[in-house]
Image (cartoon, rainbow, N blue to C red):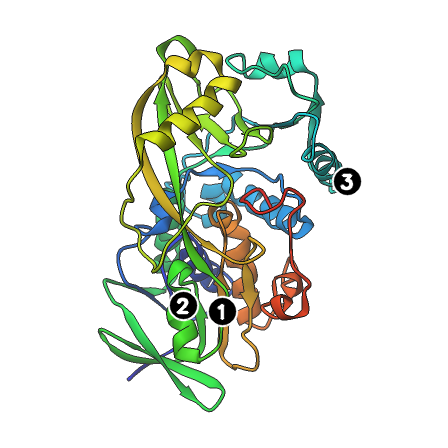
Amino acid sequence: MSHYDFIVIGAGVIGASVAHHLAALGAQSVLVVERGTIGAGTTSQSSGLLRTHYSVRQNVELARLSWWAFNNFADYLGDDEASCGLVKCGYLICSPEGDKLEPLRASLAAQRDMGIEVHLLDKAQARERLPIANFDDAALIGYEPEAGFADAYLVATGFARSARRHGVKIMEGVTVTGIVREGQRITGVETSAGNFSCGTLISTQNIWTPELAGWLGVPLPVKPERHTVLALECDGAAYSFKMPAFKDLGSAGMLYYRSYGGSQMLVSEGVIGETLNSPETEQGDISLDYVVEVGAQVAERFPAYEAAGLASSWTGVYDVTPDWNPVLGKVGDVEGLVVGFGFSGHGFKLSPGIGKILAQHALGLPTDVSLAPYALDRFASGALLVGKYGSGAVS
């Protein structure tokens, strides 16, 4: 049986980031096991938004740590050819009068207190940046110039290439079917390619985390939830790459938007989606009624899009915890195990920071951002990381 100091389950953007950071921090013997191909699962379904705006302070810290990596991706990986496909267009967020107004005000103030560049805009200034939008109802508008979007698949493969360059072995098309343990200590994994032993197992299994829960006999609160993304085309009101990504807290679906190239706009809801009975990444059905419902909300904010056409659409699956924030670190008294799951739509945005702190933790090093608030036992103690906006991916 081959032995590795560290085994990582999953080569999505989180697992690939963990592998890169383990190697960068000096780990000499690392294996990554991926059931499919690198970045081809839920990572490939990401909308790619990047922002530091969160109402949970720890997420802001992780997003700020991650933004530096995205903004300096080639240098961060030590690879002149590496690119994350970054489009630095900025990020607008607005709220009308109502229950989202004070949470937005508090979140913007917290960002500024942490030294993040955030501006308060009036309606005219917002229209200058996003002229195709209507801001008549906006009571508060925040603007984060150091934000935008990138390509999650490029990021995952970039991290994986860096990891391999530093000696990490990545096995694709290999499924983990169980764990090997001695008492409370994890000592290895059973896979479709045989058994491998390890000193520390790091699970980044995403929507497949319930498999780990079954192997451990320990509840891990996470569910797969499907979300729909629409690409709308409107020749008369093109959403250019120079226009900022936008979060509309006033819409029923707390919609987010960004340019999708040419004359297309990408739009999706930031609220609760469709809970699935089992983990899957296959494309789900998108009803015409849903398209009409979201389209009506889009037209309220972007009047020209009342006549927009549907250019394309897809579904993506989130691994959602009860408070819409991840679980990072250990599982009870199980030894030799580190987990990262339940990213609830935040995973790509936070992936460099998450990968680094999970690697630091696995190596017994101090972590750049504390794992304590993300501990599994918060669900039993009631110390939940609940965002100020309620359930949704803007936590």
Pointer 1 local density, CA inside 10 Å: few below 14, some 14–19, many at least 20: many
Residue at 59 percent of width and 45 percent of height: 63
Give residue 326's position: percent from left, percent from top. Answer: 54, 58
Vertical relation: 272 (above or below) 91: below
Q: Which residue is mark 2?
A: 210
Which residue is under mark 1? 220
Q: Secondary structure at mark 3?
A: helix
Element assignment for label 1: loop
Q: CA distance from mark 1 to mark 3?
A: 34 Å
| Mark 2 or 3, closer to the camera | 2
Residue at image position (30%, 50%) is 40
Rendered location of residue 154, percent (x, y): 36, 43
Residue furthest out toward the top: 236
Q: Which residue is mark 3?
A: 113
* Amino acid type of the residue tagged 1 in the rendering: Leu
Mark 2 touches mark 1? (CB < 8 Å): yes
Q: In which quadrant of the rendered image does the N terminus lie? A: bottom left
Give the mark nearer the N terminus: 1 vs 3.
3
Q: Nearer the viewer, residue 83 or 37?
A: 37
| Left or right side of 368 for 345 | left
| 365 or 128: nearer the viewer | 128
Inspect the image, locate mark 3, and give the three-letter code of the amino acid beneath it: Asp
Residue that extends furthest to the front in the rendered view of this protein: 289
Could you tell me which residue is drawn at 37 percent across and 70 percent down? Answer: 211
The x, y position of residue 17, in whole percent, is 45, 55
Q: Is residue 117 left or right of residue 46?
A: right
